[in-house]
Amino acid sequence: MSKVQCELCPRGCILSPGQRGDCRVRENIGGELRTLVYGKPCAVHVDPMEKKPLFHFLPGAPVLSIATAGCNLHCRYCQNWDISQRPPEETNNFDLPPEKVVAMAVENRCPAIAYTYNDPVVYYEYASDTAKLARGKGIKNVLVTAGYINEEPLKELCSLADAAHVDLKGDDQFYREVCSGTLAPVQRTIEIMKKSGVWVEVINLVVPTLNDSPDKVRWLAKWLFDSVGPDVPLHFSRFHPIYRLKNLPPTPVDALIRAREIAREVGMRYVYVGNVPGLEAENTFCPKCAKAVIKRRAYFIEENNIKNGACAFCGEKIPGVWKL
Amino acid sequence: MIVENSSAKFKWMNVRAKTVSNLTIGIVAVAALIICGCERGKTAGTSDKGWTASPAAMAVQTPNAPGRESGKARFWKTLDY
């Protein structure tokens, strides 16, 4: 029996028979690479779109969200480590093939399905088969991902995705030291998704002492501005001590507000602060008249002043997907 | 006589109020247990708390469905040495 090499993500794991990839969910079984999580999600929820968080894509819509065990990154602060850093034998799994996922979305009146919580990259085949069926039923597909994937599978997935929320975690040093990954594939993913016409929003979890310096924040915002433009929404999210970074404090709110100011100085037009309910920075402001076009509180919409994709006060077009 | 009657009525009302109060506490406690139980059930296996649970999702849960069952993966190659 032969060794195989997985070509799904930049890790390129070489596996002898019986060995499993770094993601814990792809295994060489009898000389053939098999996925162990096809049709076996361990999390199935209906979430508001704002929880992904996607702020410029079907605001307020309920989205059926699924996840399996496993991940191809190993972030020391992972908020979902109890599924992402475990093999499928150690999670409670549902038996839910793609057609049942789509039926469940219809039954729960969800206009979208999100592939989320861990990372759809590691359940690529399951996500992609589900997405194909969903599209056939007029249901949108949302990827919530760290974007650590090779170019060929990514391009195929982009053809099925309507929106993506990509985690841009920090600079290359941060990826190597905190996430066991590298930066370049993630940058490539963001650029390819944008070029493919997928609606893209980017999140950066601000971790005290590791990626919160003004220089690092400025670099990140500048890269986004130069590569995908000022209209890609950027979310700075608050870190909470968890998993292997329990020694660090939660991100001070001031640091998040400062990060937002830096990104706006660089030229990003839609910059948000997440995981801190009640801040003004949860709202979407019109870049022309500066009025709040969408007011939010945590995951809920308090006011929506977008009409036909534009600011109801001054008529300025607000980029996003506002209606089905 | 009136005073005695009032007193008796007051005592009875007081007992009734206590009974109602205990009942309320009991109902709230049972409801809280049910809600917490449901919350735990619907987020089994993840720390990410769901907003609402789909009853259908709960119905199909099969804890520890065998991980060894597998599907064919894509994007890989055989290495010949």
Image (cartoon, coloured by chain):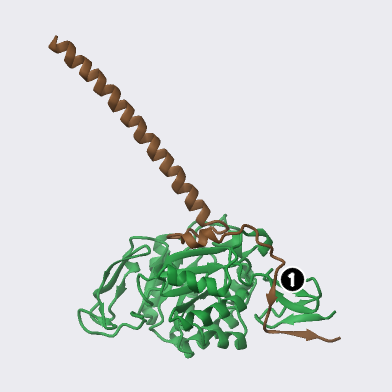
Q: Secondary structure at mark 1?
A: loop
- Chain letter for the part of the structure drawn in brown: B
Locate the C terminus of chain A by quadrant: bottom left
Residue A123 in view: yes
Residue, far left: B2
Q: Nearer the viewer, residue A245 or A112?
A: A112
Residue A236 in view: no
- The location of residue B64, given as percent across then percent down, is 65, 58
Work out whether A214 lies above or below A239. Answer: below
In the rendered structure, the answer to whether residue A78 lies left or right of residue B68 reads left
In the rendered structure, the answer to whether residue A100 lies left or right of residue B67 reads left
Q: Which residue is mark 1?
A: A20
How many callouts does the rendering have?
A: 1
- The part of the image, by quadrant, that contains residue A236 is bottom left
Question: Which residue shows up at 46% across the image and 71% down it?
Answer: A105
The colour chain A appears in is: green
Work out whether A140 lies above or below B25. Answer: below
Question: Which residue shows up at 38% across the image and 80% down it?
Answer: A268
In the rendered structure, the answer to whether residue A121 lies left or right of residue B10 reads right
Amino acid type, residue under disc 1 in the picture: Arg
- The location of residue A83, given as percent across then percent down, is 60, 62
